[in-house]
Image: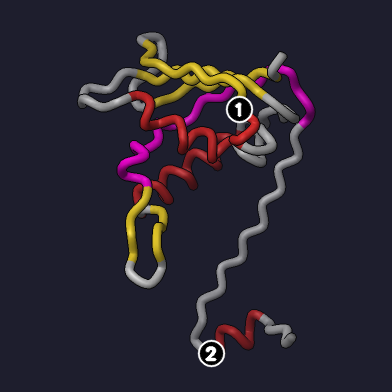
Amino acid sequence: MTAWSVADLEKRGLKVREQIVRVIATPADVVRIEIPLPPSVNMAWMNVPGKGRVRTPEYRRWHKLAFEELTAQHPGRISGRFAIVINVGRIKRRCDVDNRSKAILDLLASVVTDDDAMCERMSIGWADDVPAERVVVIVRRAA
């Protein structure tokens, strides 16, 4: 196997994007965070010939912004099974609130939770006390 340096790859006309993310979180029983409203799951993925399913530009922009906000809040970490409550600020356009949960669970995976497959229980709904286009998420260790 040949090891390539960044300079070698760039000489060949390849773009190199380095991304190192380390989030060290303290263990917690309850974590509360506030993030921007994600796009609907219907608008998060698209089919690209030769590549298959990929994230849409809208989803990538949201994920970058939400990840930055999430890590700035220094959330704790829930290990193992968890329960989650997602309160979504009302928006004027008509949409299904449940189409927002997958993006939120994926964002939390490996930062706040181990894996979204560890979710034992989820409650999601519109909340009048949350600002529009915002989401308040409460994650608790499952009993």
**Quadrant in the picture for residue 8:** bottom right
Q: Secondary structure at mark 1?
A: strand
Question: Taking 67 as reference, is 90 above or below it?
Answer: above
Instruction: Say which residue label 2 marks.
Output: 12
Question: Taking 32 as reference, is 71 above or below it?
Answer: below
Q: Earlier in the sequence, mark 1 or mark 2?
A: 2
Residue extending furthest toward the top: 129
Q: Residue at x 75, y 30 (%)?
A: 79
The alpha-carbon separation of the residues under discs 1 and 2 comes to 44 Å
State yes or no: residue 33 in magenta.
yes
Asked if one can make out residue 71 in the rendered structure from this viewpoint, the answer is no
Report the amino acid beneath label 1. Cys
Estimate the x, y position of residue 55 in percent, counting from the top left: 41, 53
**Quadrant in the picture for residue 47:** bottom left
Residue extending furthest toward the right: 27
Which quarter of the image is occupied by the N terminus?
bottom right
**Quadrant in the picture for residue 113:** top right
Horizontal side, residue 93 vs residue 38: left or right: left
Estimate the x, y position of residue 59 in percent, counting from the top left: 39, 47
State yes or no: residue 141 in magenta.
no
Q: Nearer the viewer, mark 1 or mark 2?
A: 1
Estimate the x, y position of residue 119 in percent, counting from the top left: 60, 27
Q: Residue at x 49, y 16 (%)?
A: 123
Report the amino acid beneath label 2. Arg
Q: Residue at x 68, y 84 (%)?
A: 4
The boundaries of the magenta stretch are 26-44
Q: Secondary structure at mark 2?
A: loop
Asked if one can make out residue 133 in the rendered structure from this viewpoint, the answer is yes
* Residue 119, numbered circle: 1
Q: Residue at x 59, y 35 (%)?
A: 116
